[in-house]
Each structure stands twice: as structure tokens, then as C-alpha cells.
Image (tube, rainbow, N blue to C red):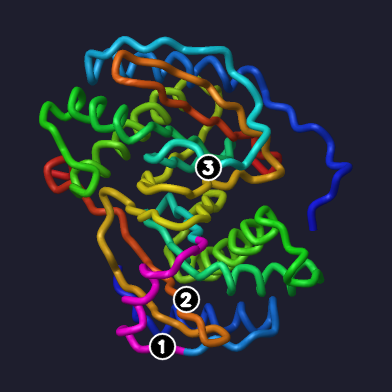
Amino acid sequence: MTFNLEEIYQIASTIWETAIGLQIEPESQDALASIGNRPRSTAACIQITGAWNGAILLDCPVEVARLVASIMFSAEPAKVTVADLQDAVAELVNMIGGNFKALLPEKCFLSLPAVVEGGDYSTRIPGSKLLGRACLCCQGHPVSITVLEKAVNQAAAA
Amino acid sequence: MSTATAPRPTIDSKFVLPFMNATRDVFLKMAGVTTTIGKPHLKSDTNAGYAVCGIIGFSGQITGSVVVSFSDTAAEKLVEAFAGVKLALTDPDFADAVGELANMIAGSAKKHLGAVASISTPSVVIGKGYVVANNRQIPCLVIPCSSPFGDFAVEVSVKRSPAL
């Protein structure tokens, strides 16, 4: 499968504007380097199975997660709980996955989002290959959306 | 927002035994490690757990996720027993091995869940001070496990999908 990062940007932009009323803009790929250096971040992954197999990973700093949660749940940012911001980022990646699924051949299923929140951690999707990574900017903070496709085991496929 | 009056979640007991058996079988057959399965309990907190997690999503007639989590030392030794070679936490093959263990446990259990479901590619998280969040609509049952190499846990958070 091929797709371009512009499609991911359009999906993200639409969701950000319609669901939470925020702007999200493309960011240079150089900003990706700073994502791994943040003290706390929230990552949400949604898996797609069926006619196409892969995953979408949303990674954002806790500041963005808190802002999104405060808007989504109509709460003051200071009163947003960890569970709220996890739910908010899960909902975002669920919407991104749902929109991305529309680009895929029938019939595909979305898993429930898996959300990880914390400091010093790394996330990997073994057995998948990187299709693309969009680097975006929300309220001055870098946000990345990564699309991974399950790698076909050539030996098994033969 | 969070509500203090949320009903206490429950989990279908039919979903528990397949994961207990699958965990025992996978480690015994694939790593030659005998594991002891403890008494399952509902996960009640969001404190940071073990350092290495393999996460598998379920979709179809069963939705939810399963998280297999290990301490870093237990993970290193169990992966060594499974892969036959010592791998560092930072080695990409280490994450592959953790993902494969989670995949085999979920795949083996899936056959006995009595439903048509797909399991996702595993996600592997390695680090410190992080929390894997559970869906608040689905209860999470923790199956504590012990092995000669250290303790680990299988967190089962699945439900039958009403849409299918």
C-alpha cells in the first residue's frame, strides 16, 4: 500500500478542527527529534486488521493531551485527570484510525486504542514496517502520527 | 470526566481460563520455562507496572486488549530462554521476541474464546515510569504469574462485542 503524508495531515487537521476546535499544522521533520526528549508524553496506538494490517501511532506531549482532554471533557486543564487525558488521546487516535480506515480496502477492523503515558519509554511495533511519519505542530508542541504496515513474511507467503 | 459513581466492572469468566492455560503452555513449550499462575484479580489502580510490556489488541466478536508485562530482568531471562540467545533491552530483536510471546499467548487463547476475533500486531513498550492505560469501559483482570526467572503478569481486558 502507498499513501502520502498529506493524507495523514488532512485527516489530523480535520479531526483537530472539528472535534476539538484546534489548529494543527505541518512541522519540519527536524522537530521529530525533540519528541523523544520530552519529560512526559502520551502515545496511543490503534491497530487495523483485515484486508490491510497495520497500526497508527499518535505521540504527543502531555501538554497537548491535557489541552485536548480539557476541551473534550469541558474541564479546566488543571482538573484533568491522567485517565481523562488517556481517554482523550485514545479518542483522537480512534478518530484518526477510523478516517484512515476509509482509505483502506474493505473489510478492515479497528482495535481499541492502547495508550501509554509516562516518561522514559519507547514504543515498538515488531513485525511492521514504517510507511510514513507525519510531524505536526499543535499549540507550539510537536505531535507525530506514524503509520506502520504489517510486514509480510515472505517465507510464509510463498 | 471521571465519575465516582461508575459501576464496578465485571469480566466474563469464560475469558479467563484460556489466557491462563495459554500463558502456561506458551512458556513451557516455547521457552522450556515452567510458570506458576496466581489468583487473578481486577486491576484497581493505574500505577506504573513492569518495565517491559507486549500489548495485543482484539477486534471482531471480541474487543479489547491483552498486556503481557515483565520486569526488565525477568524479560531478559525469559527472552533468552525463548530466543536461545541473550538480547539486550535495546536490541530490536528483544522487542520482537516480547511481541512474539504476547502474540502466541493471545493467539493460543483466542482459539478457546468461542468467538471469531482478530488479533493485532503486537505493540511493545520498554521503559520506566510509564502506565499502560486500560479502557474504562472494559474491566481489566490481572493474572499474576511467576517463573524461576522472575514474576510477570498477563492483563486481560476483553469483552464480547455487542455489534457483531
Q: Mark 3 or mark 2, which is nearer to you? A: 3
User: In the image, which disc is placed on residue A27?
Assistant: 1
Judged left or right of residue B61, residue B162 is right
Name the chain letter of the residue that bears numbered label 3: B
The residue singled out by tag 2 in the image is: A143
At x 36%, y 68%, the residue is A36
Residue plotted at (66% across, 57% down) = A87
Q: Chain of mark 2?
A: A
Query: Tags 3 and 2 in contact by the CB under 8 Å rule?
Result: no
Q: Are marks 3 and 2 on the same chain?
A: no
The circle on residue B48 is: 3
Circle 1/circle 2 CB separation < 8 Å? yes
Dot 1: few (<14), some (14–19), or many (≥20) neighbours within 10 Å? Answer: some
Give the secondary structure at mark 2: strand
- Which residue is drawn at the image coordinates 18% and 28% (left, top)? B80
Q: CA distance from mark 1 to mark 3?
A: 32 Å
Asked whether the beta carbons under mark 1 and mark 3 sit within 8 Å of each other, the answer is no
Above or below — where is A152 with respect to B74? below
Q: Position of residue B139 (x, y in %)?
A: 67, 34
Count residues near mark 3 (Cα–Cα under 10 Å), then give few for <14, some for 14-19, many for 20+.
some
Image side of residue A127 versus residue A24, left or right: left
Q: Which residues are magenta?
A: A26-42
Amino acid under disc 3: Ala
